[in-house]
Image (tube, rainbow, N blue to C red):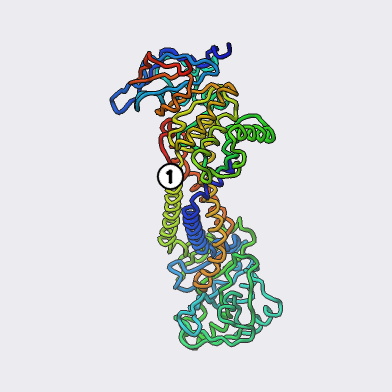
Amino acid sequence: MIVKILIRNAFRHKLRTSLTICGIAIAILAYGLLNTVIDAWYAGVEASAANRLITRNSISLIFRLPLSYREKIRSIDNVEIVSYGNWFGGYYKDEKNFFANFAVEPNSYIKLYPEYKIPENERTSFLKNRRGCLVGKKLADSFGWRIGDNISLISRIYPGKWEFVLMGIYRGKQKSVDETLFFFHWEYFNEMIKKSRPFSADNVGFYVIGVDNPENAALTAKTIDKGFENSLAETLTETEKAFQLGFVSMSESILDAIKLVSFVIIVIILVVVANTMVMSVRERINEYAVLKTLGFSGRHIAILILGESILITTIGGMVGVMATFPAARIFSYAVGTFFPVFNVTKETLLQDVIVTLIVGITAGILPTWRATTIRITDGLRKIG
Amino acid sequence: MDTLEPIVSINNVTKTYKRGDQIIPVLEEISLVINKGDYLALMGPSGSGKSTLLNLIAGLDQADKGVIEVGGIDITVLSESELSRWRVSNVGFIFQFYNLIPVLTAFENVELPLILSDLSGKERKEHVFTALKVVNIEDRMSHYPSQLSGGQQQRVAIARAIVTDPTILVADEPTGDLDRASAANVLDLMDRLNRDLGKTIIVVTHDPWAGKRAHTVKLLDKGVLSDDSQDTHS
């Protein structure tokens, strides 16, 4: 009977309840999307492997390192594989079609990133063809590229028109893998550089180093940097995760702002639901007094009010959660390659559920307290 | 001889209310005995303390001083939760504005006090049907309060009051919101409950008609029971 009253009370004012549910749904949707944006920011960090190190020039990423470092790094204990590459900074046809693109040493790079799933024939073709390129599925789909297509990129850093042939399309083994990257042969890149900017040739932007065991990563990083101390180009080696976090920290203020907005959204839904519950309970204070007169305890009244609050927020929360998936797809499509990985995670859904419950309970506390503590005779005097 | 057995015994009860720093006396040294099967009307001007006295007898409020025994139990020493449990089986309430739960049907409203009992679902149903039959509203049992007239709602409220077979029935202005015909029906029904089922009824009313139906009328003025109580049966 208590549950029956609770449910019927919740839908007594259909318009009010519907509007409250809509408000909660929109707020949970916004909260979920903002959390997904934050997750997307950290996607690179999440996807990084513990056994990969990144070595770069200690002054800044824009300064290069000699190619000759490769052999010295390879000879260090615990180092299993060394790859290298350069940030290319290219775009496709129009500057707005910008995405991450790198010239890499393909053999070693592919070995270092087993999370890229490449069909065997495409892998072989890419490795054989010096002008070949390998792109992520999401990127290929966004421009409608197919295997064998000629692709021209224009670089903001390296002049000229760079021609490539699409030889392979990779997919991520996990959802967290970025499928918007563009790779091509470092050899081709270096040859072209030799022609146009010979002073820049035989230099790399970064080394990617695979170590035998993640436990040896810190020691290996130290050894590498020590090996190049007092050289013309000193190195800074860190784990891939730390390297990615360095990028994220550059936009920390934006992330803080997003987190603040998320918090404000929670406060707003809390106020909306609390307002609905306070209004409802004020109107029904006489009924709660009648129930108490008939012998129902404060616990029963609390179940009625808190239950109603939780029921309304749960329905709103569920609608919000369900709407988050299509909204995230639309959002992801709209922002293109800006967020390479934009997935609604289980953690985000769990947070949605927790926030919904917290809001439901918190919003019901004040009206519950009022309804349970009011004297029966005072409550009976109030006509709803 | 049953009628002379005291069911409610009030001894030197005092009640005051606080309004800011002011202490307002509402009942002063009230003493009263109500016998089993009695039908008592408390009458008096507004603010005389009759509803307060009714609330004290029904265990809805606490006296500042004095003793109130109902069915041999001193209810002034009971805690809030003990009073709550006591009310379930000892007091049936009839209010001026019926106070039915609008989201429940007539049947469910009558069933409400039984939810807290140990009765099975089947037994509850039987009790509810019996109560609805007594007040002659069983044909409207699936209706919601908003689909019933004032008189019908009050009959449902009376069914809810008697469904637990309480020791006493208390009614606060039971005809105050009804037209003359509906009021007469409700008073007839209360007469029957008292006469045929032996229910002890205590009613607070302004309505002289309602007062006339009671066996005894007690007059309250400024919190004091006056001596010129009337025995309407004599």
Number of numbered discs visible in the structure rendering: 1
Image coords of residue A254 (percent x, y):
42, 62
| The N terminus of chain A, quarter of image | top right
Front residue of B185/A199: it is B185
Q: Circle 1 marks a residue in which chain?
A: A
Q: Is residue A239 visible?
A: no
Front residue of B194/B31: it is B194
Residue found at the far right of this picture: A120
Kind of element beneath mark 1 = helix
Front residue of B223/A188: it is B223
Image coords of residue A243 (percent x, y):
51, 63
The quadrant in which residue A264 appears is bottom left
Label 1: how many Cα within 10 Å (few below 14, some 14–19, many 20+): many
| The C terminus of chain A, quarter of image | top left
- Does residue A170 appear to the left or right of B48 in the view shown? right
* Residue position for label 1: A278
Q: Is residue A319 visible?
A: yes
Residue found at the far left of this picture: B21
Please determine whether, in this image, residue A242 is positioned above or below residue B114.
Answer: below
Q: Residue at x 40, y 60 (%)?
A: A253
Residue found at the far front of this picture: B234
Q: Amino acid at mark 1?
A: Val
Q: Residue at x 60, y 68 (%)?
A: A74
Image coords of residue A344 (percent x, y):
56, 61
Image coords of residue B20 (percent x, y):
29, 28
Please determine whether, in this image, residue A9 is positioned above or below residue B51.
Answer: below
